[in-house]
């Protein structure tokens, strides 16, 4: 049985305190619409994912309702008659939560809520995802980003009926962030709060930019991918970072960066980032821009895909769509097919390798084929390398020391009052060092 907290704020897990203690159950009905030429199988897969999201939020799915439509009803999304039938079904199942797989407009949500009256909450996929983010947020940055997304989602939906529901009903779709106190404020106060949160995120982004400048000379790689694809497991397998790994959606909301030594002369900075998902709310992406700055600053993206999932291709499309929304899909990338150990059908792996011939297949959990991945990273980070001869006056000892720190010195010789070095490294670093060599008068 799945259960749900009715606390106002997300509760951090603690030893000896399971999520099943002192909680109430919240039954949910899922609503999916099959559009035009879409297949029943695709809709079924999407509802399966919505079920996982609901369970991640602590809900228990007691039913699913499917409708076939050419286009959404402007007033209620599924039509008034279907909406009234849905509410009757919810009453029969003693269900107090209805979750739509598609995003509802504020007016559609308001009209559906009016039909449901006060006994049933209506939320959409976007609201559910934001609720999960609120449940998992731990750091100041993550909590600030989630609250901003919650308020931006709530603002156009703020009505007296919503205020009553928030205050009286609690549970999924009303967790954390604004809380009752925020809901009781008017639009002006919420807009003011949004402005303060944006200012705070600008400050956080500034701090992150300062940290980033200190790491500018090191090649940076970011792990991106569908939620629960095993990015954090891969991060731990490569760097022993000790990142929390859980078999649940959106277990990671904060970015973790660690150094990875590829060989004696080459190291990179590897960052683990928040996972993506189909129909990720745009205002949630916007709120998490400071966290996703690590992706923007990376010189290589590792697109981690769960190879054991039959939706692997769709998950990669979703990752690419989110990156495109962020203007980052042109970055150099390597597709990483993870969870090799979970594939029980050799045909699946063959098909994926045929579709993604340059992909690297690994098992983060079993630490299999990680050497091949490190080789692929090495090839990417040395793609812009050059070999060069430098003649540096011996009196520029600090510059010579910098050369040894930032470049691979392959040969060394001395002539008159100069140190002659044959070096291998990034073209940009070599050019910067050349610019500091003093010419003899």
Image: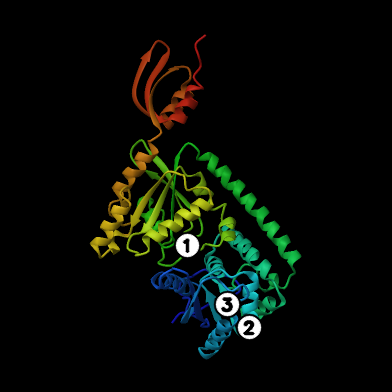
Residue toward you, 117 or 17: 117
**Residue 171 tag number:** 3
User: Which of the two marks, 1 or 3, is nearer to us in this view?
Assistant: 1
The residue sitting at 45% across, 56% down in the picture is 319
The residue sitting at 51% across, 22% down in the picture is 436
Which residue matches tag 2?
Answer: 115
Q: Disc 1, disc 3: CB below 8 Å?
A: no
Question: Which of the marked residues, 1 or 3, is nearer the chain's N terminus?
Answer: 3
Q: Is residue 296 visible?
A: yes
Q: CA distance from mark 1 to mark 3?
A: 23 Å
Which residue matches tag 1?
Answer: 277
Label 1 crowd bin: few (<14), some (14–19), many (20+), radius 10 Å:
some
Residue toward you, 392 or 365: 365
The residue sitting at 39% across, 40% down in the picture is 267
Q: Which SS class for mark 3?
A: loop
**Residue 436 tag number:** none
Q: Disc 1, disc 2: CB below 8 Å?
A: no
Residue at the far bottom in the pictured view = 92
Question: Which of the marked residues, 3 or 2, is nearer the chain's N terminus?
Answer: 2
Residue at the far top in the pictured view = 441
């Amino acid at each position: 049985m799945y259960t749900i907290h009715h606390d106002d704020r997300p509760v951090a897990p603690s030893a000896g305190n399971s999520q099943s203690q002192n909680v109430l159950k919240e039954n949910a009905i899922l609503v999916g619409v099959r559009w035009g030429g879409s297949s029943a199988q695709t809709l079924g897969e999407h509802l399966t994912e919505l079920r996982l999201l609901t369970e991640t939020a602590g809900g228990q799915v007691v039913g699913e309702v499917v409708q076939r439509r050419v286009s959404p009803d402007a007033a209620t999304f599924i039509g008034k008659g279907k909406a009234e039938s849905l509410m009757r079904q919810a009453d029969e199942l003693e269900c107090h939560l209805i979750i739509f797989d598609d995003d509802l407009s504020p007016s559609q949500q308001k009209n559906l809520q009016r039909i449901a009256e006060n006994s049933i909450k209506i939320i959409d996929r976007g609201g559910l995802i934001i609720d999960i983010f609120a449940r998992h947020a731990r750091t100041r940055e993550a909590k600030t980003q989630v609250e901003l997304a919650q308020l931006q989602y709530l603002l156009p939906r703020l009505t007296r009926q919503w205020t009553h529901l928030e205050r009286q009903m609690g549970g999924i779709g009303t967790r954390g962030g604004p809380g009752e106190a925020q809901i009781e404020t008017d639009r002006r106060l919420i807009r003011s709060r949004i402005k303060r949160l944006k200012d705070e995120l600008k400050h956080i982004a500034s701090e992150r930019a300062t940290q980033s400048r200190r790491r500018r000379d090191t090649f940076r790689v970011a792990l991106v991918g569908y939620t629960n694809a095993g990015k954090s497991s891969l991060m731990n397998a490569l760097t022993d970072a000790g990142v929390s790994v859980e078999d649940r959606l959106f277990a990671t909301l904060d970015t973790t960066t660690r150094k990875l030594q590829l060989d004696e002369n080459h190291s990179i900075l590897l960052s683990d980032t928040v996972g993506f998902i189909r129909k990720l709310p745009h205002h949630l992406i916007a709120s998490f821009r400071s966290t996703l700055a690590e992706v923007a600053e990376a010189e290589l993206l590792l697109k981690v895909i769960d190879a054991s999932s039959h939706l692997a291709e769709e998950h990669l499309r979703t990752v690419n769509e989110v990156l495109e929304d962020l203007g980052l899909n042109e970055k150099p990338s390597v597709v990483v097919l993870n969870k090799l150990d979970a594939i029980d059908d050799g045909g699946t792996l063959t098909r994926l390798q045929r579709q993604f011939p340059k992909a690297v297949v690994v098992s983060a959990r079993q630490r299999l084929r990680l050497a091949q991945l490190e080789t692929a990273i090495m090839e990417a980070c040395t793609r812009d390398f050059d070999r060069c001869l430098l003649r540096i006056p011996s009196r520029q000892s600090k510059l010579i020391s910098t050369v040894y720190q930032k470049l691979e010195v392959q040969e060394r010789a001395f002539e008159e009052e100069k140190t002659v070095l044959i070096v291998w490294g990034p073209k940009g670093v070599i050019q910067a060092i050349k610019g500091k060599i003093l010419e003899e008068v």
